[in-house]
Amino acid sequence: MSTTPSSAPATGPDPLAGTREPTAADLAGDAAALAAGQLPTAERAPGPAVVPGAVVATSAPGHSATVALGDVLPAPAHVRPVPGADFRLAEQTVIHGEPAARAAADQLAALLRPATGFPLPVTVGPTGPATGAITLALVDPDLGPEGYRLDIDRTGVRLTAATPAGLGHGVQTLRQLLPAAVESPTPVAGPWVLPGGTIADRPRFGYRGAMLDVARHFFAVDEVLRVVDHLARYKLNHLHLHLTDDQGWRIAVESWPRLTEVGGATAVGGGPGGWYSRDDYRRIVGYAAERHVTVVPEIDLPGHTHAALTAYGRLAPDGVAPPPYTGTEVGFSYLDPDRELTYSFVADVLGEVAALTPGPYLHIGGDEAFKVPADAYARFVDRVQRIVASTGKTVLGWHQIAPAPHAPGRVLQFWGRTADDPVVADAVRRGARLVMSPADRTYLDMRYTPDSPVGHDWAGAIDVRRAYDWDPTGYLDDVPAGAVLGVAAPLWTEYVTSRAELEHMLLPRLPAIAELGWSPRASHDWTGFRRRLAAQGPRWETAGTGYHRCPEVPWPVAVVPAPRSAGS
Ligand code: TNX
């Protein structure tokens, strides 16, 4: 097998030689979709968007060329293709893992079985078959807590990492190295060829995430799990859940039951709302953890608390419970920072949420508390930061918490739009670190273009190139690169009401953020990214995932894989 020392130069997307450019037919297909003037089928209809009989090309067995080794999104750090060393998955292929790699081996088998129809038995033990196997092993190849290495040759595939998370990311790479038909929920014809060579990969940043606002509109557990799947596919490792806001309180708190019973009963526009029981939340957290995604729960304080006040009038500054709020204004509600009841409430809520959350962070919001004077606000944040510390968690908050005193480890989520933010720079000098979510680049609730059917526009339109073409460590002045923990893309849901709309807003911008978070800066390249992104379209369509077929990406014409026949 070839070797790639971890010191090999970052080749980024350059080794993508051999991948096809869009053909005239592809571009004609795009034009036709755009001329239709509305969301293409893939965006409107969750569920398999490409079905036999649809107006798309049908492939014979041998449905597509082998994927090039570097055609992975996010772009891997080191790629060394070896021509002629492809491995072909077959009926007899075995997936073998040492005991600690069992979960990743099972996950890989579960991803590959539906489309291939192969049994892909998982065997566990110290050493696997010498040939014809995909072998997963936990070794220490100096690839860090999330890195992995993949060696593919004619005799087999070897995936190694130092941690289960690294193996999980390697599994996602293997999935992308197979043809798009691998996303089919039912067996389709092969061949199932993995390109030969070596990938040695690790992330640029440790925090790569997305936020889902389940407060403005509620999303059921299954919808959240689908979002986790989208994150895991692109190696994003944090799901921030915005659990509370003026329009709804979505997480059960046993010591304050009316928060959900009353505060969870509505949503923007007056819909029925909804909330997660403790078991629902545990299910989300557990499903995410299996995919190496850490859930970051946000309880937005002291503003954005109207739903809590509807449930418990005694928390309201005037002691009177207001009626529910179903509009989209911000900044009018607050908990009184000068009352002790406020802090016993906050301690109860944060204590329960911390106990349910295995991850290290508690997000305390802190944005848009316009009615609270600056000095009272800073005192409030200081005290809440101490409450978070007493739960054993680390504070994350929107960057408005910057003026408060430093708390050990605290992280500010920057959602501003200007490079010059002396208050944030000062907080960084006092020890804070940053997650970058600049609104004009990462806000997935913004429209793609001014005439998009869904979304806000206060931070401008964000097309996929705008989401991609910036640098998380280059955005803010006077902040050292080492203070940036990573990047995250918030999806606020004032105007997002369904799974179809969620996926329309997430895809294809989420992979742009994922690549900023994972890939080496030296590999940043719009042309290569857009070509690799285009190749995700057929994958989403085959998997029944909606996405926005934005015009700046050369989406290929959808291809229906032929059903599997005996021996294919
Ligand atoms: C600002 S960004 C907010 C949210 C809104 C969002 C809409 C932030 C921390 N606060 O309350 O939903 O704009 O884009």
Image (cartoon, helix red, strand yellow):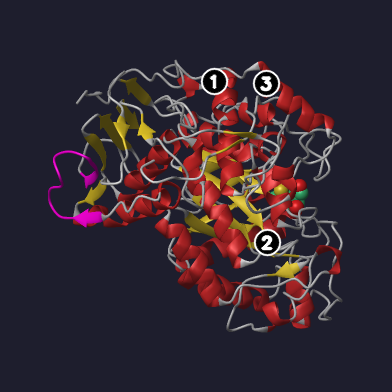
Regarding residue 419, the answer to whether it shows in the image is: no
Q: Which residues are magenta?
A: 122-138
Locate residue 479, reporting x and y percent.
55, 31
- Given residues 215 and 11, the one toward you in this image is 11
Q: Nearer the viewer, mark 2 or mark 3?
A: 3
- Given residues 421 and 552, the one toward you in this image is 552
Please name the residue shown 64% across and 37% down the image: 509
Locate residue 13, reporting x and y percent.
46, 21
Please name the residue shown 62% across and 45% down the image: 52
Task: Tell which residue pokes out farthest to the front in this image.
Answer: 566
Residue 128 magenta-highlighted:
yes
Label 3 residue SS? helix
Marks 1 and 2, Cα distance to the nearest angstrom?
34 Å
Check contact, mark 1 vs mark 2: CB within 8 A: no
Is residue 98 left or right of 244 when viewed as pictured? Answer: left
Looking at the picture, which amino acid does disc 1 mark? Gly
Q: Which residue was labeled with disc 2?
A: 214
Q: Which residue was labeled with disc 3?
A: 25
- Given residues 16 and 78, the one toward you in this image is 16
Q: Which residue was labeled with disc 1?
A: 528
Q: Earlier in the sequence, mark 2 or mark 3?
A: 3
